[in-house]
Image (tube, helix red, strand yellow):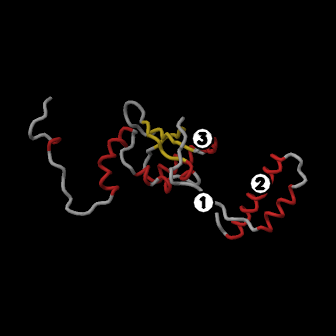
């Protein structure tokens, strides 16, 4: 069918006459991409940290919703999640807990089951761990004296690094840091 002069596609974009945020400006452009992945809206993606039970808000992310063929019945969709590889087993066992959390958030049966994506969750490029605080020279010397009797140089270095990591971890707990 040919597009006529009065078709909806030829209409000029609607002007807002106000400043808009980036999320609002890009929302319309991203909606077709979300629909292609099975999401009716951006809510499950934007509010995932609040929806998912701890710690899955940090270590998993919705990839897509797969709806059953035919009618959208009471069984809900399959939520496909990407997760960090170390959390895949726990997430597979906690699937029903995640289903309940998502359905409770939306107030109706949206998700019937959870599956894991073959694609792992990638960290954001800017999300790097902060460098550890420097250890006191006294602590470093005590750790060095403790491991100096180990004959194998590689093993001695590994034990030294382990001792320093443990000392830094205990310092964070003493200071109340996570």
Q: Is residue 114 above or below residue 18?
A: above
Q: Residue at x 13, y 34 (%)?
A: 3
Mark 2 and mark 3 residues within 8 Å of each other at the beta carbon: no
Query: Residue 162 got which mark?
Result: 2
- Mark 3 Cα within 10 Å, few/some/many (few <14, many 20+)? some
> Label 3, on which residue?
92
Q: Earlier in the sequence, mark 1 or mark 3?
A: 3
Task: Decide if residue 61 is on the left or right side of residue 155.
Answer: left
What separation in Å lies between label 1 and label 3 (alpha carbons)?
30 Å
Task: Decide if residue 14 is on the left or right side of residue 115.
Answer: left
**Residue 78 in picture, x, y percent from top left:** 47, 38
**Residue 121 in picture, x, y percent from top left:** 53, 44
- Mark 2 Cα within 10 Å, few/some/many (few <14, many 20+)? few
Q: Is residue 105 above or below residue 122?
A: below
Which corner quadrant holds the C terminus? bottom right
Picture quadrant where residue 173 is located: bottom right
Query: Residue 130 got which mark?
Result: 1
Task: Decide if residue 34 is on the left or right side of residue 90.
Answer: left
What separation in Å lies between label 1 and label 2 (alpha carbons)?
18 Å
Q: Earlier in the sequence, mark 2 or mark 3?
A: 3
Which corner quadrant holds the N terminus? top left
Q: Residue at x 53, y 37 (%)?
A: 119
- Mark 1 Cα within 10 Å, few/some/many (few <14, many 20+)? few
What separation in Å lies between label 2 and label 3 (alpha carbons)?
31 Å
Picture quadrant where residue 11 is located: top left
Task: Decide if residue 161 is on the left or right side of residue 26.
Answer: right
Q: Earlier in the sequence, mark 1 or mark 2?
A: 1
**Residue 164 in picture, x, y percent from top left:** 76, 59
Q: Residue at x 48, y 45 (%)?
A: 62
Say what secondary structure mark 3 lies in: helix
Instruction: Name the one closer to the observer, 105 or 7.
Output: 7
Q: Residue at x 34, y 46 (%)?
A: 30
């Amino acid at each position: 069918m040919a597009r006529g002069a009065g078709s909806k596609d030829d209409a000029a974009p609607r002007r807002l006459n106000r400043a808009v945020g980036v999320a609002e400006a890009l929302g319309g452009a991203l909606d077709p991409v979300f629909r292609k992945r099975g999401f009716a809206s951006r809510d499950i993606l934007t509010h995932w940290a609040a929806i998912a039970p701890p710690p899955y808000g940090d270590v998993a992310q919705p990839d897509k919703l797969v709806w059953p063929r035919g009618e959208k019945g009471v069984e809900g969709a399959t939520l496909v999640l990407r997760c960090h590889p170390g959390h895949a087993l726990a997430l597979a066992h906690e699937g029903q807990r995640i289903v309940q959390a998502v359905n409770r958030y939306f107030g109706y049966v949206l998700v019937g089951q959870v599956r894991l994506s073959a694609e792992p969750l990638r960290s954001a490029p800017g999300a790097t761990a902060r460098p550890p605080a420097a250890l006191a020279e006294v602590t470093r010397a005590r750790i060095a004296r403790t491991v100096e009797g180990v004959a194998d140089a590689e093993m001695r270095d590994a034990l030294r690094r382990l001792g320093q990591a443990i000392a830094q971890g205990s310092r964070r707990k003493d200071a109340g840091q996570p």
